[in-house]
Image: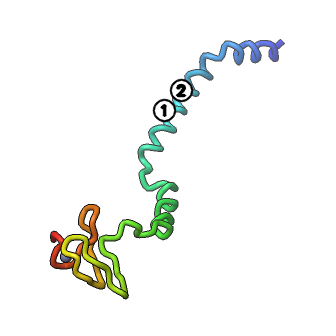
């Protein structure tokens, strides 16, 4: 019976194993060759959600005391953990 023969060939599966390995190799190769693939658009959408929480300067309309000299200024710059006036900021 020809049908029995073909089933046996499938069960032995030597050719199948070889082609599977080849396909896996092709998949990883194409991944490496596509650095601009779909993950980038998602990253591009993030910056809008990322608030500039780490501000390099702060603005106080009523003024705020410099952490170094105590002078009252409207704008202070971040210097390590302190907010200092323009004179005290280490540029
Ligand atoms: Zn100061």
Residue at image position (25%, 71%) is 67
Farthest residue, direction front:
70
Residue at image position (46%, 66%) is 50
Q: CA distance from mark 1 to mark 2?
A: 6 Å
Task: Report ligand 1 position as a quadrant.
Answer: bottom left
Quarter of the image with the N terminus in it: top right
Residue at image position (50%, 67%) is 49
Q: Quadrant of residue 47?
A: bottom left
Q: Quadrant of residue 70?
A: bottom left
Q: Secondary structure at mark 2?
A: helix
Q: Secondary structure at mark 1?
A: helix
Q: Indicate whether 1 appears above or below 26.
A: above
- The residue labelled by disc 1 is 25
Residue density around tag 2, few if under 14, some if 14–19, many if 20 or more, within 10 Å: few
Mark drawn on residue 21: 2
Residue at image position (67%, 13%) is 12
* The residue carrying mark 1 has its beta carbon less than 8 Å from ligand 1: no
Q: Indicate whether 18 appears above or below 70.
A: above
| Between 17 and 78, the one nearer to me in the picture | 78
Q: Horizontally, is 53 left or right of 74 in the view?
A: right
Q: Position of residue 29 (x, y in %)?
A: 45, 39
| Between 44 and 27, the one nearer to me in the picture | 44
Q: Horizontally, is 79 left or right of 2 in the view?
A: left
Q: How many marks?
A: 2
Quarter of the image with the C terminus in it: bottom left
Residue density around tag 1, few if under 14, some if 14–19, many if 20 or more, within 10 Å: few
Q: Look at the numbered discs 1 and 2 and tell me whether their residues touch, using CB distance below 8 Å.
A: yes
Farthest residue, direction right:
1
| Between 56 and 33, the one nearer to me in the picture | 56
| Between 82 and 52, the one nearer to me in the picture | 82
């Amino acid at each position: 019976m020809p049908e029995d023969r073909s089933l046996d060939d499938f069960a032995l599966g030597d050719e199948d194993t070889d082609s599977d390995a080849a396909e896996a190799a092709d998949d990883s190769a194409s991944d490496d060759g596509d650095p601009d693939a779909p993950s980038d658009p998602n990253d591009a959408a993030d910056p809008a959600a990322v608030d500039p929480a780490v501000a390099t300067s702060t603005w106080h309309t009523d003024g705020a005391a410099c952490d170094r000299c105590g002078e009252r200024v409207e704008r202070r710059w971040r210097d390590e953990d302190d907010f200092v006036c323009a004179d005290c900021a280490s540029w």
